[in-house]
Each structure stands twice: as structure tokens, then as C-alpha cells.
Amino acid sequence: MFLHKKKSLIFLVVVFIVIGSLGLFFYQRNAASAKDAAAQKTAKVIKTDLKIAFSIDGKLVIDSYEPNFSVSGKIAKVLVKEGDVVKKGQWLALLDTQEAQKDLEKSLLDYSKERNDFDQDTQVTYADKVITDTFKRILEKNQWDLSRAVLDVELSNLAIQQSKLISPAEGVVAVINIKAGGYASTQNQTAAITIVQPDSLQFIAYAEEDDVLRITEEQSTNIVLQAYTKDQFPAKVVFVSPQATLDANGIASYKVAADIENQKNLKLIDGMEGSLSFVAKEVKNVLAIPNKSIIRENNQTYVLVKKENAELVKTAIQTAFTDGKNVEVTSGLELGQEVVVGN
């Protein structure tokens, strides 16, 4: 009987040991699970706007005009100074016309002589009513001399007329590269005077073919300038070129021009660099979670929802639009819930 009691005692000890071990095992496992759950990176379900956007680089460009003399000559006078407001057709500078006037007077004298010779030869011809081959050649030469004299007169007169540098548009004189006493040459590629229109600032960018297909005239956009890194300026596309511009590598791009809205109160200058930002697609005020929280199994979408007690619950959801970073949730989640990110 003593032996029987001893065996029963041993059995009870073994049972207690097993139960204790199992309890410790489950405690440690639950503690580890709780620790793992607590260590999981999570994100809350938020309500936000999602959009797919793209941008193209460019800069602000002002309308400018660069009139030059059409004839060469000594510059007699510059009639404007930098900063002057000028009107279309206004005289900007004058060439010395003394030589041109002398050339015109000489051309007129030559013309008079040639005209007189031509008239006399013609009268003789009609009077005699006989035209020989030799006389025909004389008449042809006289006609050529007369035509040349007429052309010389016209050119000399044109030289006087074009001795005036005239403004092609209304604007402000921005740069003057000539001075009185200097020489204006038609071979000089530098503009004599540059006139700008301050209110004509546009943002000019060049889009590659993939992007230009998504841009239309009258499309709203935002301009971000490097000088104003914290601001976005509303703008509207006013021109999309149908003709490609090829770079040195033969890659095509297309000119896009946009007007900044309400730019009068902004300090904007020619050459400011920045980018045009376009929204290709957008959804507003939707529930969203990070893309990295999504689990896909058997054509079903899930997330791990973290409860208040740190328990993780696998939950089926439905998604829609994504901007590549976050995804719209249409069912299965509520605002403020926590989901595990990175599974």
C-alpha cells in the first residue's frame, strides 16, 4: 500500500511539472507574441487626398525684341536710355546720313543722265522706224543702265530711311549695346538695343513625349520656383507645341508655355528656374493606408489590424486608387484603426 501511495505521489508531481511547463510555454509564447506585436511598425487609417503627379523643368521667360540696323554706318545718336518706356514705331537711334545723302544725290544725277540718253535713243528709233541689230543692243544697254540707275536711287533712298532704328513693339529698354560715334555693322550678331515687355513673363518648359500626351491647353497646373521653395503658384497652360525640338542626342521634347495667375504681386524675373507640376489623376477625402501594409493571398487583399490589447487580426479589405505610396480603402477599415506596415 505504501508503494501504491508513492507511485500516486510521483504521478502527481509529474502532472504538476507537465502543467507548469505547458503554462510557462504558453506564457512565454504569448509574451513573445505580445512583444512582437508591440514591436510591429504600424500606421493609422487616415482620410486624405491621393494623386498621381508629374513635373517638367523649365524657367521664366520674358518677351523680348532685339532690333538692329538694316544698313551699316556710323552711329550719330542714341535717342533712348536703359529703363525708358518706348512705343511701337518710336525712333531708338540714328545713323549718320551724310554719306547716304551724297550717294542719293549722285544716284539721282546718274539716273537723270541715263533717262535722258534712253529717251533720246528711243525718239530716234521711232523717228527713223529702222531698228538694226546693233541699235537693238544699244537700246538694251541703255535700258539696263537706266534700270541700274533707278535701283541705285532706291537703294540710296532706302539707306536714308533705314538709318533710323525703330522700336518693333511697346516695352522697356533693357539693354543698349551701341553708343554715339560707334559703328553699326550688319555683320554684328549682337542686338543694338533689347526691348522687353515686363508683363509678358511666361514659364517655358520642354516635356518628353510620354508627358506631353498628358498635357492639354487650358490645363491647370502649379509652378514651383527654386527661389520660392515653399510656395506653389497656380498657372494655366496656354501653348503646347505640336512640333518636336531635338537635342544633341536626337531626343524629342515639346515646348509647353504656362501663364502664372495673379503675378502682379509677385517679384518674378526673367530666367528664374523651377518646374511645372501636373496632376494626372486625383481622388479627394478618402480613407487610405500605406501600400506596404497590404497582404495579398488567393486574389484577396488583407491587412493586419492591431487591436488595443496588441492582438493582430487578419482583416479582409477592398482597395481602389493608389498613388504608389498609399492606397485608397473602400471597405473593411475605419478611420483611426492601426494596421501593420511592412508584412
Image: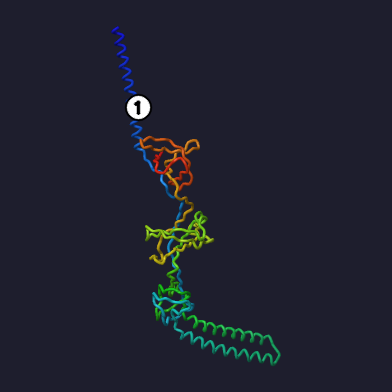
Q: Does residue 10 sit above or below 195 in this rendering?
A: above
Q: Alpha-carbon neighbours of circle 1 within 10 Å: few (<14), some, or many (≥20)?
A: few
Image mark count: 1
Task: Give the image location of residue 203, x and y in percent.
Answer: 45, 63
SS at mark 1 in the image: helix
Taking depth in this image into account, of 274 and 328 the one nearest to the observer is 328
Which quadrant, please, contains the C terminus? top left
Which quadrant, please, contains the N terminus? top left
Give the amino acid at mark 1: Phe
Task: Give the image location of residue 311, x and y in percent.
Answer: 38, 34
Please tell me which residue is depicted at 60% across the width and 84% down the height of the picture.
144
Quarter assignment of residue 185: bottom left
Task: Give the image location of residue 71, x and y in percent.
Answer: 48, 79
Please tell me which residue is depicted at 45% across the width and 81% down the height of the picture.
95
- The residue to which callout 1 is attached is 26
Taking depth in this image into account, of 89 and 296 the one nearest to the observer is 296
Task: Give the image location of residue 96, x and y in percent.
Answer: 44, 83
Taking depth in this image into account, of 109 and 5 the one nearest to the observer is 5
Quarter assignment of residue 315: top left
